[in-house]
Image (cartoon, rainbow, N blue to C red):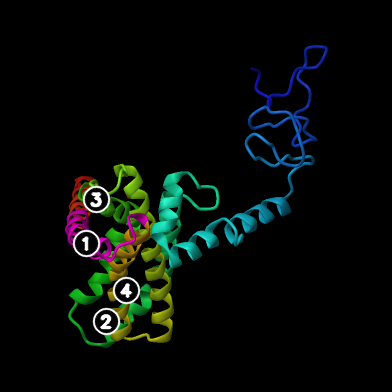
């Protein structure tokens, strides 16, 4: 089957001028005959006129801020019942939601962005408190090691959580490792998003050492959120919630420490190799 996006040659053998979008009589995505404004086979919208900058902006706003599907809808549903979102996604209802990996990337970007805005304030607070030189170095370590690898760091750290979770609950749920990982990623992404927002709000409202401690404590939200996710993802029993909390806390902390140490060692080795 010829590629419908390729413009055919003219009668004299010369290539005709390439054009953008024109009225379509069939779907450019799957080739199905046209019926209405959307393809009945794959759901893609037909384009009957050239794309404009306004179209790009409207498409972005529609996808991100649509309350019936998209990013805000995903965040809202995850705040209410993360387990049901993951369960629906695994069962095949995926169109209304941002995918788990994409959501994790977005949440990590929010976290990194908020850290960029408050990093100087954190350093100033440490110095004003007269703390040892090692304390401001914590912020510098975030800049040097954690921030550049945040998405990888957070994602890799939840892999063992999903694996242990899947093994423990395999007697009551026929979820694969990947399906269990979807639930854990959604919950971890939501927790990362909360931490990023709280980090910015608290450091603006309470720019103090207490504020920094509150921000650091907010990272622990990941454990109750994963536990909450287990309630809707499995059998809706409180036993599953407490068991998941224990699993996620133990495994995640061990994995996070291991990944941080590995990243620091790797970066130190790369810096040493570069210097040599």
- Residue assigned mark 3: 169
For label 1, the residue is: 243
Q: Which is more foreground, mark 2 or mark 3?
A: 3
| Residue 190, x across and y down, in percent | 40, 63
Write down the region rendered in magenta: 233-259
* Structural crowding at the residue carrying mark 4, measured as other residues with C-alpha within 10 Å and reported as few (<14), some (14–19) or many (≥20): some
Does 266 appear above or below 12? below
* Residue 220, percent from left and from top: 28, 70
* Residue 245 forms part of the magenta stretch: yes
Q: Residue drawn at (73%, 24%), measured in percent from left and top? A: 7
Lateral position of residue 102 relative to residue 154, left or right: right
Report which residue position mark 2 lands on. Answer: 126
Dot placed on the residue nearer the N-terminal end, 2 or 3: 2
If you read the primary sequence from the N terminus, does the residue marked by circle 1 or circle 3 appear first? 3
Q: Nearer the viewer, mark 2 or mark 1?
A: 1
Q: Earlier in the sequence, mark 2 or mark 4?
A: 2
The one nearer the camera, 7 or 240, is 240
State the CA–CA distance, disc 3 to disc 4. 27 Å
Local SS, label 4: helix
Residue 34 sits inside the magenta stretch: no
Task: State the residue at coordinates (31%, 42%).
Answer: 176
In front: mark 2 or mark 4? 4
Q: Is 53 left or right of 145, judged from the image as shown?
A: right
Residue at (45, 49) in percent of width and height? 89
Of the two numbered discs 3 and 4 in the rendering, the one whose residue sits closer to the viewer: 3
Asked if the residues shown at circle 2 and circle 4 are in contact, with their CB atoms under 8 angstroms apart, the answer is no
Residue to which mark 4 is pinned = 218
Mark 1 or mark 4: name the one nearer the start of the chain: 4
Q: How crowded is the residue under tag 2: few (<14 C-alpha within 10 Å), some, or many (20+)?
A: many
């Amino acid at each position: 089957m010829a590629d419908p996006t390729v413009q055919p040659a003219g009668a004299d053998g010369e290539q005709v001028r390439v054009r953008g979008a024109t009225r379509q009589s069939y779907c450019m995505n799957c080739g199905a005959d046209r019926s209405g404004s959307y393809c009945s086979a794959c759901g893609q919208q037909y384009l009957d006129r050239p794309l404009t900058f306004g179209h790009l902006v409207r498409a972005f706003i529609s996808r991100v801020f649509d309350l019936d599907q998209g990013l805000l809808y995903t965040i809202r549903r995850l705040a209410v019942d993360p387990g049901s979102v993951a369960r629906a996604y695994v069962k095949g209802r995926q169109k209304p939601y941002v995918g788990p990996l994409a959501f994790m990337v977005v949440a990590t970007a929010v976290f990194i962005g908020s850290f960029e805005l408050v990093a100087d304030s954190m350093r100033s607070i440490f110095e004003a408190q007269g703390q040892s030189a090692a304390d401001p170095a914590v912020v510098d370590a975030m800049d040097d090691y954690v921030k550049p690898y945040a998405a990888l760091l957070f994602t890799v750290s939840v892999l063992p959580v999903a694996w242990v979770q899947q093994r423990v609950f395999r007697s009551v749920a026929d979820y694969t490792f990947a399906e269990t990982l979807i639930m854990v990623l959604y919950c971890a992404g939501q927790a990362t998003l909360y931490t990023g927002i709280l980090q910015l709000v608290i450091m603006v409202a309470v720019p103090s050492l207490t504020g920094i401690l509150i921000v650091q404590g907010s990272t622990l939200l990941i454990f109750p959120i994963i536990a909450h996710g287990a309630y809707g993802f499995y059998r809706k029993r409180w036993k599953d919630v407490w068991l998941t909390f224990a699993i996620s806390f133990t495994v995640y902390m061990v994995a996070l420490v291991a990944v941080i140490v590995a990243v620091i060692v790797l970066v130190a080795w790369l810096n040493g190799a570069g210097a040599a």
